[in-house]
Image: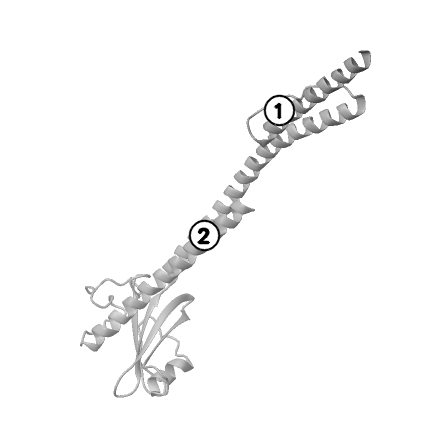
Amino acid sequence: ALAAGATIAGGAVSYFATENELRDQVDTSLVDAAQRVANGAPVNNDRAPIGAPDGDGDNDGRYRSFTQILVQVIDADGTILQSPRSGELPVTEADRKVASGDARRGNLRHDVSFEGEPYRVLTVAVTDGGAVQFARSLQETEDVLDRIRNQTLLIVVGLSALAALVGIVIAQQVTRRLVRLTDAASAVATSGDLELQVPVEGRDETGRLGTAFNGMLASLARSKKAQQQLVQD
């Protein structure tokens, strides 16, 4: 139980730390793309990631999964003015509030599902009304997190099984000597034979207990012999 608990705790820390790090990297790339567009960089929708050479897209017009950044422009009421050739990104009510200027902040980050694939979206309001949406795939992030979760489960099962085997071996060694000590004490109590010796193994607490038990029997035997000698005298 301790081994499983420690492994689960370590795996959970690793999982959430990796998730936060990967999401931070995705958010950083979206902010960088927004800054480049704000500085006048062209929007290369469905051709190549912003700042990359043209022709880096797949044959169907979509970017490669992880490096892909899709750009979509919406007006103040959420109507899509320009969308990626691969399809229109979902526009939520929160995105419309950002575009109309009703949101408390001028940008919004959230997750959406686009063509069955999870995406991270950054919606940034523009000064003349409307907003620009930047989206990047989270599929590779999800794959990495799935691998970490599966590996953690395998490690938990493996360490738990190993800990159980080690615990059984240690418990059998300790309890075997305790059982023999208990049997010896019962035999002495039943027969009164103080010459009985308990086999002593190891130098741990159980071994020292066996040595002390043998010493106690020897002391009782000497006392009994002294009593018999006194009676004879």
The answer to which of 91 and 178 lies nearer the viewer is 178
| Horizontal side of residue 227 vs 91, given as left or right | right
Q: Secondary structure at mark 1?
A: helix
Q: Residues within 10 Å of mark 1 (few under 14, many from 20)?
A: some
| Residue identifier under label 1 | 211
Q: Give the mark, 2 or 1, whose residue is nearer the N terminus.
A: 2
Name the residue rendered at 55%, 35% in the picture. Answer: 166
| Horizontal side of residue 70 vs 180, given as left or right | left
Residue type marked 1: Thr
Residues marked 2 and 1 touching at CB (< 8 Å): no
Image-quadrant location for residue 49: bottom left
| Horizontal side of residue 150 vs 229, given as left or right | left
Compared to residue 32, the image places residue 145 above or below, namely: above
The answer to which of 131 and 104 lies nearer the viewer is 104
| Residue identifier under label 2 | 11
Residue 7 placement (x, y as % from top left): 48, 48
Compared to residue 85, the image places residue 67 above or below, namely: above
Residue 156 placement (x, y as % from top left): 50, 47
Name the residue rendered at 35%, 72% in the picture. Answer: 121
Image-quadrant location for residue 230: top right
Residue type marked 2: Gly
Of labels 2 and 1, the one closer to you: 1
Name the residue rendered at 61%, 22% in the picture. Answer: 200
